[in-house]
Image (cartoon, rainbow, N blue to C red):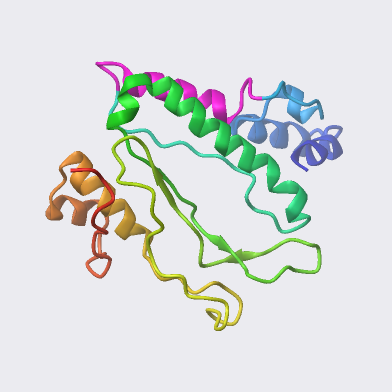
Amino acid sequence: MYARIAALHAGDPLTGPAIAAGLRERGFSAATLAGAAEPPNRFGFPALAAAAGRLLAAADGPRLAALEIGGWDTHANQAARLAGPLRQLDAGMVALKAGLGPAWRRSVVLVMTEFGRTVRINGTRGTDHGTGTVAFVLGGAVAGGRVRGTWPGLGALFEGRDLVPTTDLRSIAKGVLGPHLGLSAAALAQVFPDSAAAAAMTGLVRS
C-alpha cells in the first residue's frame, strides 16, 4: 500500500519527495517503494532478532532489547495476511534463541501487542482494533509450559465487541522484570507509574 501511495505521488514535485523521504525514514527501502519484493528474511525480523541475540549474548553487551514487528493491523483479508507476520515472529524467536546461544538459558522474552482485535469479522473479512489479546513469555529462564490468566469465554463481550480483558499486561511485565532483573517494587512503580492495581504476576521466572 505504501509503495502504491509513493508511486501515485512520485510525479508531484511537492508531495512526491516528501512522502518518499518519510517512508525511507520509517525504514522502507528504495526496492520496496518501487514495488520490488525484498529477499526473504534478509532484512526482516528474523535477521533483526538474530543480531539482537548476538549483542545480548556478548559479555559487554546490553541486558535488554526491544524489537518490533508490524503487519498485525489486519482490517481486511485477515486469514491470508496473518500468515506472514506469524511466520516472521516464529522464525524471529528461533533466530533470537540461536543468536543468544548459551545465554538463552538465562533469558526471558516477552511477546506482547499494544492492542487486540475484535471478536467478530468485519465486512472485508478482517477484524478491527480491539481490547483483549494474548501475550507470550518464553526463554530458558521461564517457568513455562502453562497458560496463565482466566479465559473469559465468548458469552459476554467487552463493550459488545471485544474479548473481555482479564490480565493487565503490566502485571506480566512486572512479573518478569522483578525477579529476573532484581527490580524492587519501588523501581517497578517508577517503570509503570500509576499501576498499583496491576500486581506483579508471580511464578513466571525460574527461581
Examine the rendered structure and indicate whether residue 176 appears above or below residue 98: below
Q: Residue furthest top?
A: 59
Q: Quadrant of residue 28?
A: top right
**79 with respect to 159 (left or right):** right
| Magenta stretch contains residue 47 | yes
By secondary structure, the bulk of the magenta-drawn segment is best described as helix
Residue 105: in sight, yes or no?
Answer: yes
Residue 202: quadrant of the picture:
bottom left
| Location of the C terminus (image quadrant) | top left
| Front position in the image: 153 or 83 | 153
Q: Is residue 135 on the magenta stretch?
A: no
Q: Residue at x 49, y 33 (%)?
A: 93
Task: Work out whether 58 lies above or below 144.
Answer: above
In this rendering, position of residue 13 left or right of residue 147: right
At 87% from the left edge and 32% from the top edge, which residue is drawn? 11
Looking at the picture, how far across and down is residue 95, in whole percent?
50, 26
Which residue is more in the foreground, 139 or 157? 139
The residue drawn where x is 78% and y is 34% is 16
Residue segment shown in magenta = 41-61
Query: How many marks do you count on the picture?
Result: 0
Q: Residue at x 26, y 64 (%)?
A: 195
Residue 114 place in picture, x, y as percent = 49, 55
Is 9 rendered above or below residue 73? Answer: above
The image position of residue 76, as x and y in percent, is: 76, 57
